[in-house]
Image: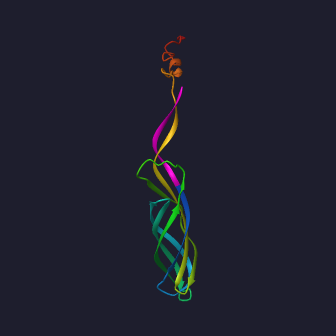
Amino acid sequence: MNEIREIVTRAVLAKGKKLFRVRQIITPEHSAFSVLGCWVINHEFEAKLNGKRVDVSGNFEIDIWYAYDNNSRTEVARGIATYEDSIKVREIVSENIGDHCDVIARVLQQPTCTNARIVDEGIEVEVIFEILVEVIGETKMMVTVFTNSPHYEPIDDFENEINEDFLNDRPIEE
Protein backbone atom coordinates (compact mmCIF):
# COMPACT_ATOMS: atom_id res chain seq x y z
CA MET A 1 0.00 0.00 0.00
CA ASN A 2 1.27 3.48 -0.85
CA GLU A 3 0.92 6.62 1.18
CA ILE A 4 1.44 10.25 0.24
CA ARG A 5 3.16 12.40 2.83
CA GLU A 6 4.08 16.04 3.01
CA ILE A 7 7.70 16.74 3.97
CA VAL A 8 9.65 19.92 4.65
CA THR A 9 13.04 20.18 2.93
CA ARG A 10 15.63 22.67 1.73
CA ALA A 11 15.62 23.07 -2.02
CA VAL A 12 16.56 25.45 -4.83
CA LEU A 13 13.70 27.96 -4.94
CA ALA A 14 15.03 30.21 -7.72
CA LYS A 15 18.04 30.49 -10.02
CA GLY A 16 19.54 32.77 -12.61
CA LYS A 17 22.75 33.52 -14.47
CA LYS A 18 24.32 36.50 -16.16
CA LEU A 19 27.22 37.25 -18.48
CA PHE A 20 29.16 40.27 -17.21
CA ARG A 21 31.21 42.66 -19.38
CA VAL A 22 33.53 44.99 -17.51
CA ARG A 23 35.60 47.70 -19.20
CA GLN A 24 38.48 49.21 -17.30
CA ILE A 25 41.18 51.69 -18.25
CA ILE A 26 44.59 50.93 -16.76
CA THR A 27 47.11 53.78 -16.72
CA PRO A 28 50.63 52.41 -17.24
CA GLU A 29 53.75 54.06 -15.86
CA HIS A 30 55.11 54.64 -19.40
CA SER A 31 53.31 55.48 -22.63
CA ALA A 32 52.38 52.10 -24.13
CA PHE A 33 53.51 51.26 -27.67
CA SER A 34 51.90 47.79 -27.87
CA VAL A 35 50.02 45.36 -25.62
CA LEU A 36 51.80 42.01 -25.26
CA GLY A 37 49.43 40.18 -22.89
CA CYS A 38 46.71 40.50 -20.29
CA TRP A 39 45.87 38.37 -17.23
CA VAL A 40 42.93 38.54 -14.86
CA ILE A 41 43.58 37.12 -11.38
CA ASN A 42 42.30 37.18 -7.78
CA HIS A 43 38.57 37.36 -8.55
CA GLU A 44 36.50 37.88 -5.39
CA PHE A 45 32.75 38.46 -5.19
CA GLU A 46 29.71 38.21 -2.94
CA ALA A 47 26.01 37.78 -3.63
CA LYS A 48 23.00 38.94 -1.60
CA LEU A 49 19.29 38.32 -2.13
CA ASN A 50 17.26 41.46 -2.89
CA GLY A 51 13.63 40.53 -3.61
CA LYS A 52 13.40 38.81 -7.01
CA ARG A 53 17.04 39.68 -7.77
CA VAL A 54 20.45 38.77 -6.44
CA ASP A 55 22.90 41.67 -6.10
CA VAL A 56 26.47 40.70 -7.00
CA SER A 57 29.52 42.83 -6.25
CA GLY A 58 33.17 42.00 -6.60
CA ASN A 59 36.61 42.85 -7.90
CA PHE A 60 39.58 41.34 -9.70
CA GLU A 61 43.13 42.31 -10.57
CA ILE A 62 44.15 43.03 -14.16
CA ASP A 63 47.81 42.66 -15.14
CA ILE A 64 48.82 44.02 -18.55
CA TRP A 65 52.17 43.26 -20.11
CA TYR A 66 53.02 46.07 -22.50
CA ALA A 67 55.94 47.40 -24.53
CA TYR A 68 57.09 51.02 -24.56
CA ASP A 69 60.00 53.09 -25.87
CA ASN A 70 59.37 51.99 -29.47
CA ASN A 71 59.01 48.29 -28.46
CA SER A 72 62.47 48.18 -26.86
CA ARG A 73 61.36 47.78 -23.21
CA THR A 74 58.53 45.98 -21.42
CA GLU A 75 56.66 46.50 -18.19
CA VAL A 76 53.59 45.13 -16.36
CA ALA A 77 50.81 47.54 -15.38
CA ARG A 78 48.37 46.51 -12.66
CA GLY A 79 44.91 47.70 -11.80
CA ILE A 80 41.88 46.64 -9.78
CA ALA A 81 38.47 46.50 -11.47
CA THR A 82 35.30 46.57 -9.36
CA TYR A 83 31.75 45.80 -10.42
CA GLU A 84 28.20 45.75 -9.05
CA ASP A 85 25.15 44.37 -10.82
CA SER A 86 21.93 42.43 -10.27
CA ILE A 87 20.97 39.02 -11.59
CA LYS A 88 17.28 38.29 -12.15
CA VAL A 89 16.24 34.95 -10.70
CA ARG A 90 13.52 32.70 -12.11
CA GLU A 91 11.31 31.10 -9.49
CA ILE A 92 11.40 27.29 -9.58
CA VAL A 93 9.42 26.51 -6.41
CA SER A 94 6.70 28.95 -5.42
CA GLU A 95 6.12 27.87 -1.83
CA ASN A 96 8.79 29.22 0.52
CA ILE A 97 7.85 28.43 4.11
CA GLY A 98 10.97 29.73 5.87
CA ASP A 99 12.03 33.22 6.83
CA HIS A 100 15.64 32.77 5.75
CA CYS A 101 17.05 32.03 2.30
CA ASP A 102 20.66 31.36 1.38
CA VAL A 103 22.30 32.39 -1.88
CA ILE A 104 24.88 30.17 -3.56
CA ALA A 105 26.86 31.88 -6.32
CA ARG A 106 29.31 30.14 -8.66
CA VAL A 107 31.47 31.38 -11.48
CA LEU A 108 30.55 29.48 -14.66
CA GLN A 109 33.18 31.25 -16.77
CA GLN A 110 36.23 32.75 -15.08
CA PRO A 111 37.06 36.40 -15.86
CA THR A 112 38.94 36.52 -19.16
CA CYS A 113 40.37 39.45 -21.09
CA THR A 114 38.69 39.57 -24.50
CA ASN A 115 40.12 42.85 -25.75
CA ALA A 116 42.94 45.21 -24.81
CA ARG A 117 43.71 48.36 -26.79
CA ILE A 118 45.73 51.50 -26.34
CA VAL A 119 43.65 54.66 -25.87
CA ASP A 120 44.59 58.24 -24.96
CA GLU A 121 44.14 57.66 -21.21
CA GLY A 122 46.08 54.37 -21.11
CA ILE A 123 45.10 50.78 -21.96
CA GLU A 124 41.41 49.90 -22.15
CA VAL A 125 40.67 46.29 -21.20
CA GLU A 126 37.41 44.38 -21.68
CA VAL A 127 36.82 41.42 -19.36
CA ILE A 128 33.92 38.94 -19.56
CA PHE A 129 32.76 36.33 -17.05
CA GLU A 130 29.55 34.49 -16.14
CA ILE A 131 28.00 33.93 -12.70
CA LEU A 132 25.21 31.50 -11.70
CA VAL A 133 23.15 32.15 -8.55
CA GLU A 134 20.78 29.82 -6.72
CA VAL A 135 18.39 30.79 -3.93
CA ILE A 136 18.02 27.99 -1.35
CA GLY A 137 15.16 27.89 1.15
CA GLU A 138 12.65 25.69 2.96
CA THR A 139 9.66 24.34 1.07
CA LYS A 140 7.06 21.57 1.32
CA MET A 141 6.89 18.58 -0.99
CA MET A 142 4.44 15.72 -1.45
CA VAL A 143 6.18 12.35 -1.65
CA THR A 144 4.94 8.83 -2.20
CA VAL A 145 6.00 6.34 0.47
CA PHE A 146 6.25 2.68 -0.54
CA THR A 147 6.06 0.15 2.28
CA ASN A 148 7.96 -3.14 2.19
CA SER A 149 6.62 -6.48 3.33
CA PRO A 150 6.55 -6.60 7.15
CA HIS A 151 9.14 -9.39 7.49
CA TYR A 152 11.98 -9.14 5.04
CA GLU A 153 15.15 -11.09 5.75
CA PRO A 154 17.73 -11.22 3.01
CA ILE A 155 18.99 -14.72 2.34
CA ASP A 156 22.55 -15.02 1.22
CA ASP A 157 22.54 -18.09 -1.01
CA PHE A 158 26.25 -17.86 -1.64
CA GLU A 159 27.11 -18.59 2.00
CA ASN A 160 24.76 -21.59 2.02
CA GLU A 161 26.50 -23.12 -1.01
CA ILE A 162 30.03 -23.06 0.43
CA ASN A 163 31.31 -26.35 1.79
CA GLU A 164 34.21 -25.49 4.04
CA ASP A 165 35.19 -29.16 4.47
CA PHE A 166 35.48 -30.01 0.78
CA LEU A 167 39.19 -30.83 1.12
CA ASN A 168 38.60 -33.08 4.11
CA ASP A 169 35.76 -34.95 2.38
CA ARG A 170 37.93 -36.10 -0.57
CA PRO A 171 39.04 -39.69 -0.55
CA ILE A 172 42.78 -40.07 -0.22
CA GLU A 173 44.37 -42.10 -2.99
CA GLU A 174 47.55 -43.97 -2.29
Which residue is drawn at the image coordinates 48% and 37% (left, top)? 6
Q: How many marks?
A: 0
Snapshot colouring = rainbow
Image quadrant containing the N terminus = top right
Residue in the foreground of this view, choosing between 10 and 105:
10
Indicate yes or no whether the magenta region holds residue 39.
Answer: no
Image quadrant containing the C terminus = top right
Reply above or below: 136 against 109. Answer: above
Q: Position of residue 75 (x, y in %)?
A: 49, 81
Q: Position of residue 139 (x, y in %)?
A: 47, 45
**What stretch of residues is rendered in magenta?**
1-14
Which residue is drawn at the image coordinates 53% and 12% (left, top)? 170
Among the 4 quarters of the image, the one containing residue 71: bottom right
Reply above or below: 154 against 119. Answer: above
Q: Position of residue 63 (x, y in %)?
A: 49, 75
Q: Main secondary structure of the magenta part?
A: strand
Residue in the foreground of this view, choosing between 156 and 10:
10
Extreme residue toward the left, this view: 99
Q: Position of residue 131 (x, y in %)?
A: 52, 62
